[in-house]
Image (cartoon, rainbow, N blue to C red):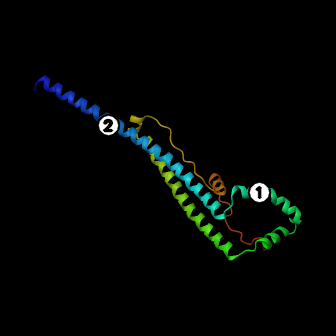
């Protein structure tokens, strides 16, 4: 074999190797960007789902910000004028002014169903966010990604949870989770 053929083969091999290396770098770089953008988009999905839940509550209850503000402004005057606030008089007045009806119960049931459905959507979106966080963080720790993309900061998902659940997770101790359904009735003394 002549030296020209050997040099030509080495040059072709070197060019091929450089092209493969560049292809791997580009592919890894694009995958990192794609995973990062998917994580950020999923964070927005979580925000949208919780916002939708509050929107459902606001829409179903039909309470506008203006109505709430005006009620807050006039409510103390109504209480004062009626002489309410002592001995259960407020609850008696509320029941007389707006007695419970089947329609109110039906509306409340519909609201509860809508909120529960939206909570499930929210939970699913938050689960996807956790999965995106795991995928991205696994990817940036991969030796090939480290070589081509370099050391990247891990993504951290902000998990939204009920305050009592957050306290339980932080302390590692579950508080009494029983439901007290007595609603102010006299309870038998604990022995």
Q: Is mark 1 on a helix, strand or loop?
A: helix
Which residue is at a point 85% across and 63% down the rendered structure image?
A: 79
The residue wearing badge 2 is: 23
Looking at the picture, how far across and down is residue 9, in whole percent? 17, 29
Compare residues 99 and 149 and report the one nearer the observer. Answer: 99
Q: Is residue 141 visible?
A: no
Which residue is at a point 62% across and 67% down the rendered structure image?
A: 112
Dot placed on the residue nearer the N-terminal end, 1 or 2: 2
Looking at the picture, how far across and down is residue 122, in whole percent? 55, 57
Q: Is mark 2 on a helix, strand or loop?
A: helix
Residue 60 sits in quarter: bottom right
The residue wearing badge 1 is: 70
Give the class, few, some or many, for how many residues have Cα within 10 Å of label 1's Cα (few <14, many ≥20): few
Looking at the picture, how far across and down is residue 65, in whole percent? 70, 55
Q: Label 1 vs label 2: CA separation?
A: 64 Å
Q: Can residue 73 be seen in this view?
A: yes
Residue at the far left: name it: 1
Number of the front mark, 1 or 2: 1
Compare residues 56 and 187 and report the one nearer the observer. Answer: 56
Quadrant where the N terminus lies? top left
Image-based side of 154 in relation to 185, left or right? left
- Residue 144 sits above or below residue 78 on the image: above
Image-based side of 84 in relation to 67, left or right? right
């Amino acid at each position: 074999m002549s030296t020209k053929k050997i040099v030509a083969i080495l040059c072709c091999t070197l060019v091929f190797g450089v092209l493969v290396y560049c292809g791997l770098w580009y592919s890894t770089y694009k995958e990192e960007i794609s995973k990062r953008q998917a994580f950020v988009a999923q964070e927005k999905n979580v925000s949208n789902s919780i916002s939708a839940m509050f929107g459902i509550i606001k829409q179903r209850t039909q309470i506008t910000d203006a109505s709430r503000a005006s009620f807050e402004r006039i409510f103390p005057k109504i209480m004062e004028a009626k002489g309410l606030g002592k001995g259960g008089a407020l609850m008696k007045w509320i029941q007389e002014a707006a007695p419970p009806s089947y329609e109110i119960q039906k509306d409340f049931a519909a609201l509860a169903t809508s909120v529960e459905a939206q909570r499930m959507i929210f939970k699913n979106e938050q689960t996807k966010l956790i999965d995106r966080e795991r995928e991205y963080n696994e990817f940036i720790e991969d030796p090939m990604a480290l070589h081509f993309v370099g050391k990247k900061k891990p993504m951290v998902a902000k998990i939204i949870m009920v305050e009592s659940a957050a306290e339980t997770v932080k302390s590692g101790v579950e508080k009494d989770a029983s439901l007290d359904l007595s609603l102010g009735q006299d309870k038998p003394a604990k022995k």
